[in-house]
Amino acid sequence: MENLRTINVALLGVGTVGGGVYKLIQRQASELPHKINANLEVKKILVRDTSKDRPGIPKEILTDSFEDIINDESIDIVVEVTGGIDPARERIARALQAGKSVVTANKDLIAVHGGELLDEAAKAGRDLRFEAAVAGGIPIIRPFKECLAGNNITEVMGIVNGTTNYILTKMDEDGMDFDEALALATELGYAEADPTADIEGYDAGRKVAIMASLAFNSRVVFSDVNVEGITKITAQDIEFARNFGKVIKLLGITRNSEEGIEASVHPILIDKTHPLAAVRESFNAVFVHGDAVDDAMFYGRGAGEFPTASAVMGDIIEESRNIMMGCTGRIGCSCYKTIPIKPASEVESKFFLRMEVPDRAGVLAGISNIFGEHNISITQVVQTPSVDGIANLVIMTDDVRQKNFDDAIAKLEALDSVNEINSIIRVY
């Protein structure tokens, strides 16, 4: 379309996600004028090495200097897809201060410094958008800020890491052990060369911090989230879960309770009938409970070049519309409350406990006594046939305060009648 304004975009990084964004902008070139009433052009791309050949990308738009972007007054939107805390934090702040709106996929940064960067956006009358920071291509950030704004949200839970969900799916459906499933995930590109952030739950923890902040309108940062990964989950745990009619998923859960916000990431046994139990392989899903909407689930691809680029593009298009209408800064930081974080020791959960014990009279009675002393109610007990005088004892508890449970475990570990505590997993 002729005689339309051009919205100029600068990309910070053109790796997997940045490359996907560039491709989508080219793919959507004929559609975008109708969607935003303007043309959209990538004017500059920040890279480390401008001499490197990047098929499909003109070399004249590449730069290795951030100053080229910050000093270009014609650039309207800066898209940060490099990741990490620094130098992304400074670059985003400077872009906002220079009057440019920012779109980012950087969950690490938003989970720690999102509040201060949103403040910078508000001072500048610009927007900081980060739909791609949680759950890849699944829309969840804007629904919290807009579609669900009329709700009092009390709980958000979800599968927000595709790598761990793929691993647990393979362990459950194909009988793989953890190391075998991780190796396959790495081979197929679902896991990074260093998978620590995924398998230890840190990636999901950052996303939980962001979702909790939006859901409860109170700032939650990554260090507020109680995090545990899946490295201790065994094929035996998977089998016992199946026998109880459950599956094991790495879930991020955050609740707004009377005592404060609970925020955690843990492997959790959930009933096979729960919608999240059916989320397989690398897919993500977020389950939201609100007082008006009741239950809503958002499901889709949680990562990858185009799913993540889809979320970034959605932000670019929405911000372009705001620029065209002169209404940037319309929806800023939504954290207008200060709700305390509930200490992890005070959070209540149900537990699955698997231990090796001698197959002799009085063992279960001794364990039950310790649980009774700490106000822990047992709901189910299963003991496997003994091998060489040793049996597997599996106990499921009712809701118990974390501190009470930890105190009981410390006493159990000191018992002569408990050879080893193999697994402790929460139950939803």
Image (cartoon, rainbow, N blue to C red):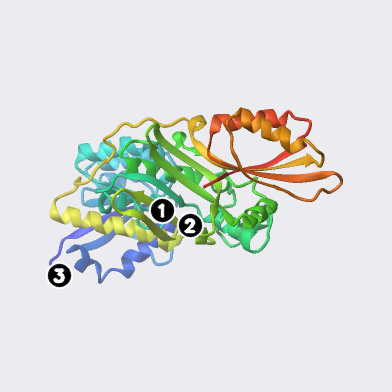
Say few, some or many: other residues with alpha carbon within 10 Å of mark 2 (under 14 / 14 to 19 / 20 or more). many
Image position of 31 with respect to 348: above or below: below
Task: Residue under label 2, please give it.
Answer: 276
- Give the x, y percent position of residue 222: 44, 37
Closest to the observer, 74 or 243: 243
Q: Are marks 1 and 2 in contact (CB under 8 Å)?
A: yes
- Give the x, y percent position of residue 315: 29, 55
In what element is the residue under mark 1? strand
Q: Do the residues labelled 1 and 3 touch (CB within 8 Å)?
A: no
For residue 336, what is the image quadrant? top left
Of circles 1 and 3, the one toward us is 1
Task: Residue under label 1, please give it.
Answer: 287
Distance in Å between CA atoms under marks 1 and 2: 8 Å
State which tag comes first along the sequence, 2 or 3: 3
- Which residue is found at the position 56% from the left and 58% from the top? 166
Tell me if 290 is positioned left or right of 82 in this view.
left
Image position of 199 with respect to 418: above or below: below
In what element is the residue under mark 3? loop
- Which residue is found at the position 37% from the left and 30% from the top? 340
State which tag comes first along the sequence, 1 or 3: 3
For residue 324, what is the image quadrant? bottom left
**Amino acid of disc 3:** Glu
Closest to the observer, 158 or 58: 158
- Which residue is found at the position 48% from the left and 40% from the top? 264
- Give the x, y percent position of residue 18: 40, 57
Task: Residue under label 3, please give it.
Answer: 2
**Amino acid of disc 1:** Phe
Of circles 2 and 3, the one toward us is 2
